[in-house]
Amino acid sequence: MDAYSITGQTVFPEGVRPARIGIDPGSGVVVSVEDSRNSVPADKLIFPGFVDAHVHAREYPEPTEPGSVEWEKWQSACKKEIFTSAGNAAINGGVTAIGAMPNDPSPPDNPEGYEAKLRISESSPCPVVLFACVTRNSEPWGDIPYKVYLDSTPSTVAFDSWSDLEETLERYRGRRLFFHAEDPEILQKNAGKGPRWKTRPPEAESNAVRRILDLTTKFGLKTHICHVSTQEAVTTIQEYNRNASTRVTSEASPHHLFFHVNNGKVSAPGWREIPNVNLLESNPPLRSETDRAFLMEALKTGQVDILATDHAPHTIQDKLAGAPGMPHLDTVGQFVCWLLKKQGFTPQRVAEALSVVPSELFAPNLAIAQGHIKPGFAASFTILDLHAKVSVDRVGIQGRGLFRTRCGWSPFTGYRFPGTVMKTIVRGQGYTFYEDSL
């Protein structure tokens, strides 16, 4: 394929301006960026490609004994998502690279298991940064992101004891660690006492964040806190960062920014029709309107560093049975349009939260640098149409067709977004969902 260019209102750190971007699809990089004097639509924005740092792609190496219990678990997981479908859903939502989480029945906690899963991840049409899992007996082995899970009960992936975690982290000094921050002791104390917003209270998160920050200092960790959901957790991280030599980063997820709960009743700004609340269960759970509004402002001002979906492709049947989490990849671009048009985010802040900072977190693991629109960086772009208004229905997005995620639903069913993804370009390869293109 020959070199080509795109022209439009382009988002740079210093502002938005018309630009002509030269692309070499062979190498997948930007070869030139020039100011454009051509008239371009003001409501079509070119962003450096979005990077979703928190995705559950479900697929992992197939167990060797077909028909066994472990094989049945693998087959069930792959019915919900595989790397091919996760990559397609990402591109559908304007995402050009994903970070794949390791909470599999057989977690990638050693070089052999990690390499086996890495080979499978190559089936994704967009780049995948693969997380390794920290487990009780695991050892670090490379400059890769590691995920730490905390929960009320022990499992192959989760710690239910702070002493066990501290003993393990002694071996992970100086490593990049991403934490699911909920205090197992508080979760154990509240087990069986009601819905998630009661059994996983705000103090479970804030307590866990404090203890993780203590461990960060003790072991010199490069720490990232996943899916923060409370004002107290964000404030605690802010206070720590004032005197820290290395910044602790954090992320917010769409459901914690959009929905809130009040005595079990779920609401969302400007939206009357809320789907079955069982579909909105997550870990950590939805929080109060006070927490939601604070989290929104914290993400807008950069106190929370990035937006990451925590895409969790469960089937409707699994959700009704209590599975936590919800799918978001297909609707990332639409959600960003809502942030831009309804929540007062600037294009520069969106680029920072979804492109610049996630790319920096994954920099050692991206074959081609991304996060900026300049020569030598990946020719990966998210192009949004802020004029179109699209509704999400039970099986897809108006004008876009079916969801690409295998689980086939969205928590935003029934909502009308004030914009959509016009085109996604991944390392020079364009994916268009409208007849007109740049």
Image (cartoon, rainbow, N blue to C red):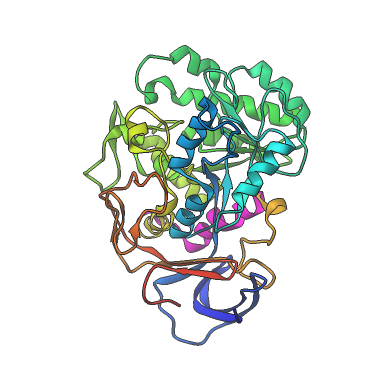
Depicted 204 relative to depicted 291: above or below: above
| Whole-percent x, y for residue 145 in the image | 67, 42
Residue 375 visible: yes
* Span colored in magenta: 343-361
Furthest residue toward bottom: 37
Give the prevailing secondary structure in the magenta stretch.
helix
Residue 307 visible: no
| Whole-percent x, y for residue 111 in the image | 74, 38
Q: Is residue 46 left or right of residue 326?
A: right
User: In percent of the image, x 55 and y 23: which residue is there?
Assistant: 207
Which residue is nearer to you in this view: 89 or 122? 122
| Whole-percent x, y for residue 61 in the image | 60, 39
Which residue is nearer to you in this view: 320 or 83? 83
Which residue is nearer to you in this view: 165 or 321? 321
| Image label count | 0
Furthest residue toward left: 272
Rendered-image quadrant of the C terminus = bottom left
Q: Name the quadrant containing residue 30.
A: bottom right
| Whole-percent x, y for residue 265 in the image | 27, 31
Depicted 259 relative to depicted 187: above or below: below
User: In percent of the image, x 41 and y 59: which residue is there?
Assistant: 340
Residue 200 forms part of the magenta stretch? no
Furthest residue toward front: 66
Residue 360 forms part of the magenta stretch? yes
User: In percent of the image, x 48 and y 63: which residue is there?
Assistant: 347
Rendered-image quadrant of the N terminus = bottom right
Depicted 168 relative to depicted 314: above or below: above
Q: Is residue 368 left or right of residue 89?
A: right
Q: Is residue 420 left or right of residue 267?
A: right
